[in-house]
Amino acid sequence: METVLLDWLQLFIRWLHIIAGVAWIGASFYFVWLNNHLRPPAEKHKEIDGELWAIHGGAFYQIHRFGLAPGKIPEQLHWFKWEAYVTWLSGISLLILMYYFKAKVYLIDAASPMPVWQAIAIGVGGLASGWVIYDLLQRSPIGKNNALFGAIFFLLTCGAAFAFSHFFSGRAAYIHVGAMLGTIMVGNVFFNIIPSQKDLVKAAEEGRTPDKKVAAAAKNRSLHNNYITLPVLFIMISNHYPFTYAHQYNWIILAVVSLAGALIRHWFNLKGQGKKNYWLWPTAALGLIALALVTAPPRTRKPELVKPITFAEVQPVIQKHCTRCHSDHPTDEIFKAAPLGVKYDSAEQIKALAEKIKTRAVDSESMPLGNKTKMTREERDLLGSWIEQGAPIH
């Protein structure tokens, strides 16, 4: 009963995380797009420095941007902050419930000698240090050069991915990189963007000129969040694709995909400013194609060179390592229902899902989770050879 309730709790938190994340990302994309498309107003105005006409949903809209603050603050002023806070809080809650409460399943391999408390400390420390290092870099002279800062930040993120991949399971390593980037994003909102906006409002109410440097710094960090978004979104969906996080060089895969996402985002931002660029999309596309080709699992053996393998030989392997979870009646202490409804109770079910077994247990070695049943390389090779021979069951 407790397990079922915990599963429902995780589902609701995940749903909340997606809802809030969509709202936050949508606002980020919209306001960067808006700033890029604003043009000098047709009629000069001492307070307005940009305007835009748009049509949407059967109506026309005219949008004005004030240089710093209007002469009078309106009674209703919408603040974009709760989308960020709820996204981060729900994401951290999921991290704790799934990866820290079930550390031996999701965070570290079952055979890892590392104590659970130490793994959790590394994870939490990584999230905190990621924000501190980013913030110090941004406040240093390096932060004044966007190209240099971006290059250093990318290399440091790659270093974090490399480190996490050596402490944690591949899936947990990816999630911690995403959580670190998400912490940086929400840190920008909480410590810089919102305080800057509060200063703008206070200055307008007091009739003084706000500090333009503070506003510019907040805008710059908002732009950073815009670029970080696509790598974080990739990480959110990557757990459905074990050929990424379970690969031997998973951190390099994450680095290349993240860089491609940042290049695509940069193309859109340049386009909004009316600047043409012809190399960003091809570069990102070629990088991803090359990545797919390089990381494709090789065929290590030819079926005709391996002795015929019978179902009787592989059935004990599947019963030992797979049916603890994937069964009508799982015996696993965590999973009380077959994950994704996948079951291997009969020979026919096993044969029908043979390619899935090969992808998860042989090629990517992402199953069993955390290798909690200690599946050997020899057992994986046996399964792979049987499936390559057509997965005969008679």
Image: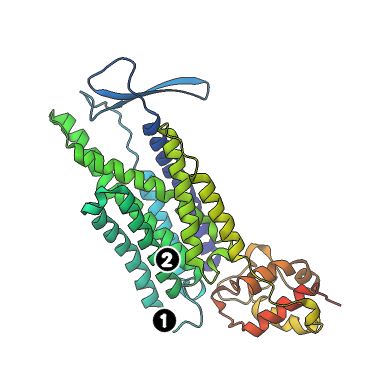
The quadrant of the picture occupied by the C terminus is: bottom right
Res. 98 in view: no
Q: Quadrant of residue 135?
A: bottom left
Asked if residue 287 shows in the view, the reply is yes
> Is the C-beta separation of discs 1 and 2 under 8 Å?
no
Label 1, label 2: how far apart the Cα atoms are: 18 Å
- Quadrant location of the N terminus in the rendered image: bottom right
The three-letter amino acid code for the residue at tag 2 is Ala
Q: Secondary structure at mark 2?
A: helix
Helix, strand or loop at label 1? It is loop
Give the image location of residue 211, x and y in percent.
17, 37
Q: Position of residue 223 (x, y in %)?
A: 35, 43
285 left or right, relative to 165: right
- Please state which amino acid type lies under the numbered disc 1: Met
Identify residue for label 1: 114
Say which label, 1 or 2, has the lower sequence index. 1
| Label 1 neighbour load within 10 Å: few <14, some 14-19, many 20+ | few
Residue sitting at x 42%, y 55%: 90
User: Residue shown at 30%/43% (left/top)?
Assistant: 220
Residue situated furthest top in the rendering: 43
Q: Residue shown at 56%/76% (left/top)?
A: 333
Please rate how many residues cluster around mark 2, counting C-alpha atoms within 10 Å: few if below 14, some from 14 to 19, many from 20. Answer: many
